[in-house]
């Protein structure tokens, strides 16, 4: 049996697969936001729950925001900032009492989509995560391109291109810059943009639903979002020119996107 875990900014999802790839069970729990120790403990508890319910021990793979710095061995570039500067893979291995395979979540997504998903058979696939954060991954001829710094595909921390005067310099980002793509195109980024323009506090899903129902302010927010997504992806296309771009993450489930 194999256990896969997706560690996100708002939820951790677990899936158990048989050796033939059959889904045995799947469930999710809320991420302990801002609490590193509680996050490690939750992952350990979820592994124990899977193995108890399935009645078998398993190998473990984890997708996480950010990546392991190849020099320090510590997490970096995670929008779940409590993970940054921590030896997440080593701490989880120690707590679980076994090795764990860990990789960037957008990279995992793109490899999967490039092999048997929306990008299957394509030479160059760019995978996009639109969720609590914004990430990306790049697969060429079926193989992940990660780069020496493990940041290939991380378009979410490029500046939003061709900003309009009322967009510049852009919202502050946890990375220390302003105007990162993530601050505009993540779920929280869409919600913050709606509020800045005078809208009531709403989640991205609520804004999309209101827009679909014809609510004017929400519709204008979605129009801005679509325009920004197109601008941001045009930069990826100019540099990489992928054969397929596959969208994933909670925000990508909005029908108009």
Image (cartoon, grey):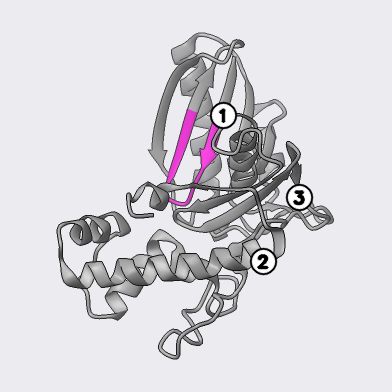
Q: CA distance from mark 1 to mark 2?
A: 34 Å
Q: Quadrant of the N terminus?
A: top right
Range of the magenta residues? 5-14
38, above or below 164, in the image:
above
Residue shown at 66% from the left, 33% from the top: 121
79 or 129, nearer to the observer: 129
Majority SS type along the magenta span:
strand
80 shown above or below 18? below
Pointers 1 and 3 in contact (C-beta within 8 Å): no
- Percent x, y of residue 118: 54, 37
Circle 1: is it few (<14), some (14-19), or many (20+) Cα within 10 Å? Answer: many
Tag on residue 4? 1
Instruction: Give the mark nearer the N terminus: 1 vs 2.
Output: 1
Mark closest to the chain's N terminus, 1 or 3:
1
Residue 142 found in image quarter: top right
Residue 146 - label:
3
Number of dots carrying numbers: 3
Judging by the rendered image, the residue that carries numbered circle 2 is 238
10 Å crowding of disc 3: few (<14), some (14-19), many (20+): some
Horizontal and vertical percent position of residue 38: 49, 45
């Amino acid at each position: 049996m194999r256990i896969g875990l997706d560690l996100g900014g708002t939820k951790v999802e677990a899936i158990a697969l048989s050796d033939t790839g059959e889904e045995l069970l799947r469930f999710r729990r809320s991420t302990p936001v801002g609490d590193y120790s509680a996050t490690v403990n939750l992952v350990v508890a979820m592994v124990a729950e899977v193995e108890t319910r399935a009645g078998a021990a398993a190998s473990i793979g984890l997708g996480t925001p950010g990546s392991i710095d190849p020099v320090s061995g510590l997490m970096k570039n995670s929008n779940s900032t409590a993970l940054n500067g921590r030896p997440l893979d080593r701490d989880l291995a120690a707590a679980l009492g076994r090795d764990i395979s860990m990789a960037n979540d957008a990279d995992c997504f793109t490899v999967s989509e490039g092999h048997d998903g929306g990008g299957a058979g394509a030479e160059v696939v760019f995978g996009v995560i639109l969720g609590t954060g914004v990430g990306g991954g790049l697969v060429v001829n079926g193989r992940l391109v990660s780069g020496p710094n493990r940041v290939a595909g991380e378009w979410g921390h490029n500046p939003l291109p061709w900003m309009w005067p009322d967009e510049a310099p852009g919202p502050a980002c946890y990375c220390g810059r302003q105007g990162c793509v993530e601050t505009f195109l993540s779920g929280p980024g869409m919600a913050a943009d709606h509020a800045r323009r005078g809208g009531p506090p709403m989640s991205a899903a609520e804004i999309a639903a209101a827009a679909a129902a014809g609510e004017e302010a929400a519709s204008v927010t979605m129009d801005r979002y679509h325009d920004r997504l197109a601008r941001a992806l045009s930069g990826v296309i100019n540099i990489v020119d992928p054969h397929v771009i596959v969208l994933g993450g909670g925000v990508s489930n909005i029908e108009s996107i």
